[in-house]
Amino acid sequence: MPAHSLERRLIERFQHGMPVCAEPYREMAQQLDCSQDQLIACLQQMAERGSLSRIGPVFEHRHAGASTLAALAVPAERLQQVAARISQFPEVNHNYAREHHYNLWFVLTGPDRPHLQQVLDELEADTGLTPLDLPMLTAYRIDLGFALAEAP
Protein backbone atom coordinates (compact mmCIF):
# COMPACT_ATOMS: atom_id res chain seq x y z
CA MET A 1 0.00 0.00 0.00
CA PRO A 2 1.51 3.41 -0.95
CA ALA A 3 2.41 5.56 2.05
CA HIS A 4 0.34 8.51 0.81
CA SER A 5 -2.73 6.24 0.63
CA LEU A 6 -2.29 5.20 4.26
CA GLU A 7 -1.77 8.83 5.29
CA ARG A 8 -4.96 9.90 3.53
CA ARG A 9 -7.01 7.09 5.05
CA LEU A 10 -5.51 7.74 8.48
CA ILE A 11 -6.42 11.43 8.38
CA GLU A 12 -9.88 10.80 6.92
CA ARG A 13 -10.73 8.19 9.55
CA PHE A 14 -9.16 9.61 12.72
CA GLN A 15 -9.06 13.40 12.50
CA HIS A 16 -12.25 13.50 14.59
CA GLY A 17 -11.36 10.93 17.20
CA MET A 18 -9.13 8.05 18.08
CA PRO A 19 -10.18 4.82 19.73
CA VAL A 20 -10.35 5.07 23.49
CA CYS A 21 -8.84 1.76 24.55
CA ALA A 22 -5.67 0.23 25.98
CA GLU A 23 -4.02 -0.10 22.55
CA PRO A 24 -5.36 2.69 20.31
CA TYR A 25 -2.68 2.34 17.62
CA ARG A 26 -3.34 -1.38 17.27
CA GLU A 27 -7.08 -0.68 16.94
CA MET A 28 -6.43 2.07 14.37
CA ALA A 29 -4.19 -0.25 12.35
CA GLN A 30 -6.88 -2.94 12.35
CA GLN A 31 -9.47 -0.44 11.12
CA LEU A 32 -7.10 0.69 8.34
CA ASP A 33 -6.06 -2.87 7.40
CA CYS A 34 -2.36 -2.32 8.05
CA SER A 35 0.12 -3.30 10.75
CA GLN A 36 0.66 -1.25 13.89
CA ASP A 37 4.30 -0.76 12.81
CA GLN A 38 3.15 0.66 9.45
CA LEU A 39 0.73 2.99 11.20
CA ILE A 40 3.34 4.27 13.65
CA ALA A 41 5.91 4.72 10.85
CA CYS A 42 3.33 6.71 8.89
CA LEU A 43 2.64 8.97 11.89
CA GLN A 44 6.38 9.48 12.46
CA GLN A 45 6.95 10.42 8.80
CA MET A 46 4.07 12.89 8.91
CA ALA A 47 5.49 14.45 12.09
CA GLU A 48 9.00 14.68 10.60
CA ARG A 49 7.62 16.49 7.52
CA GLY A 50 5.57 18.85 9.69
CA SER A 51 2.27 17.46 8.37
CA LEU A 52 1.30 16.35 11.86
CA SER A 53 1.94 18.44 14.93
CA ARG A 54 0.08 16.63 17.67
CA ILE A 55 -1.83 13.50 18.58
CA GLY A 56 -3.84 13.79 21.75
CA PRO A 57 -7.15 14.47 23.37
CA VAL A 58 -9.00 17.76 23.45
CA PHE A 59 -10.78 18.16 26.76
CA GLU A 60 -13.73 20.32 27.65
CA HIS A 61 -11.76 22.45 30.09
CA ARG A 62 -14.66 23.06 32.46
CA HIS A 63 -14.83 19.31 33.09
CA ALA A 64 -11.07 18.79 33.30
CA GLY A 65 -10.08 21.76 35.46
CA ALA A 66 -9.30 25.23 34.18
CA SER A 67 -7.51 26.69 31.19
CA THR A 68 -6.55 30.05 29.77
CA LEU A 69 -4.97 31.52 26.68
CA ALA A 70 -2.03 33.73 27.57
CA ALA A 71 0.44 35.90 25.70
CA LEU A 72 3.69 37.70 26.36
CA ALA A 73 5.37 40.63 24.63
CA VAL A 74 8.88 39.21 24.38
CA PRO A 75 11.90 41.09 23.03
CA ALA A 76 12.94 39.34 19.80
CA GLU A 77 16.38 38.42 21.14
CA ARG A 78 14.77 36.56 24.10
CA LEU A 79 11.98 34.78 22.21
CA GLN A 80 13.62 31.33 22.05
CA GLN A 81 14.77 31.49 25.67
CA VAL A 82 11.34 32.51 26.99
CA ALA A 83 9.54 29.96 24.78
CA ALA A 84 11.81 27.21 26.11
CA ARG A 85 11.06 28.28 29.70
CA ILE A 86 7.31 28.27 29.07
CA SER A 87 7.51 24.80 27.53
CA GLN A 88 9.04 23.45 30.76
CA PHE A 89 5.72 23.85 32.57
CA PRO A 90 3.58 20.70 32.36
CA GLU A 91 0.50 22.96 32.37
CA VAL A 92 1.48 24.38 28.95
CA ASN A 93 -0.31 22.62 26.10
CA HIS A 94 1.59 24.45 23.38
CA ASN A 95 3.16 27.81 22.66
CA TYR A 96 3.71 29.62 19.41
CA ALA A 97 5.14 32.85 18.04
CA ARG A 98 2.99 35.51 16.37
CA GLU A 99 3.84 38.71 14.55
CA HIS A 100 2.31 41.16 17.01
CA HIS A 101 3.27 43.19 20.07
CA TYR A 102 2.20 40.11 22.04
CA ASN A 103 4.41 37.73 20.09
CA LEU A 104 4.42 34.55 22.20
CA TRP A 105 1.09 32.83 22.89
CA PHE A 106 0.42 29.73 24.97
CA VAL A 107 -2.40 27.74 26.53
CA LEU A 108 -2.32 26.71 30.20
CA THR A 109 -4.44 23.93 31.66
CA GLY A 110 -4.54 23.01 35.34
CA PRO A 111 -6.75 21.76 38.15
CA ASP A 112 -8.26 25.16 38.96
CA ARG A 113 -7.96 28.90 38.35
CA PRO A 114 -5.73 29.61 41.39
CA HIS A 115 -3.22 27.04 40.09
CA LEU A 116 -3.13 28.78 36.68
CA GLN A 117 -2.59 32.12 38.38
CA GLN A 118 0.32 30.62 40.31
CA VAL A 119 1.92 29.49 37.02
CA LEU A 120 1.36 32.92 35.44
CA ASP A 121 2.88 34.60 38.50
CA GLU A 122 5.90 32.27 38.37
CA LEU A 123 6.38 32.98 34.66
CA GLU A 124 6.27 36.71 35.33
CA ALA A 125 8.80 36.36 38.15
CA ASP A 126 11.09 34.19 35.97
CA THR A 127 10.94 36.31 32.81
CA GLY A 128 10.19 39.82 34.06
CA LEU A 129 7.35 39.91 31.50
CA THR A 130 3.69 40.37 32.43
CA PRO A 131 1.41 37.76 30.84
CA LEU A 132 -1.79 38.81 29.12
CA ASP A 133 -4.37 36.41 30.59
CA LEU A 134 -7.37 35.65 28.37
CA PRO A 135 -9.59 33.00 30.01
CA MET A 136 -12.38 31.66 27.82
CA LEU A 137 -15.74 33.17 28.67
CA THR A 138 -17.82 31.39 26.03
CA ALA A 139 -16.97 28.13 24.27
CA TYR A 140 -17.58 27.92 20.54
CA ARG A 141 -17.33 24.50 18.95
CA ILE A 142 -16.00 24.34 15.43
CA ASP A 143 -15.69 20.81 14.15
CA LEU A 144 -12.83 21.49 11.79
CA GLY A 145 -12.03 18.57 9.55
CA PHE A 146 -11.16 18.12 5.95
CA ALA A 147 -12.17 15.55 3.36
CA LEU A 148 -9.08 14.65 1.36
CA ALA A 149 -9.72 14.21 -2.33
CA GLU A 150 -7.59 11.93 -4.46
CA ALA A 151 -4.78 13.81 -6.22
CA PRO A 152 -5.25 14.06 -10.01
Image (spheres, helix red, strand yellow):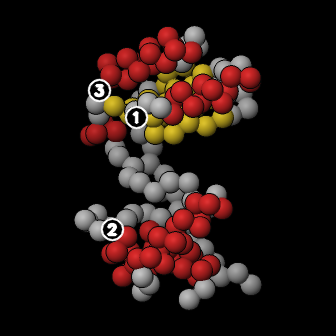
Q: Please indicate whether residue 149 sits to the left or right of residue 90 in the image.
A: right
Residue 150 image offset from top left, x and y in percent: 65, 82
- Nearer to the camera, 136 or 67: 67
At 71% from the left edge and 19% from the top edge, which residue is drawn?
75
Q: CA distance from mark 2 to mark 1?
A: 23 Å
Distance, label 1 to label 3, CA atoms, is: 14 Å
Dot 2 or dot 3, earlier in sequence:
2
Residue of label 1: 90
45 w.r.t. 108: above or below = below
Is 147 above or below relative to 128? Answer: below
Vertical placement of residue 53 versus 83, above or below = below
Q: Which mark is residue 112?
A: 3
Can you tell which of label 1 and label 3 is closer to the viewer?
Answer: 1
The residue under label 2 is which amino acid type? Answer: Pro
Q: What residue sits right under mark 2 in the picture?
A: 24
The residue sitting at 38% across, 74% down in the picture is: 28
Q: Earlier in the sequence, mark 1 or mark 3?
A: 1
Q: Could you tell whether 136 is left or right of 24 in the image?
A: right
Q: Which residue is painted at 73% across and 32% down in the image?
A: 99
Question: Residue 125 or 93: which is nearer the viewer?
Answer: 125
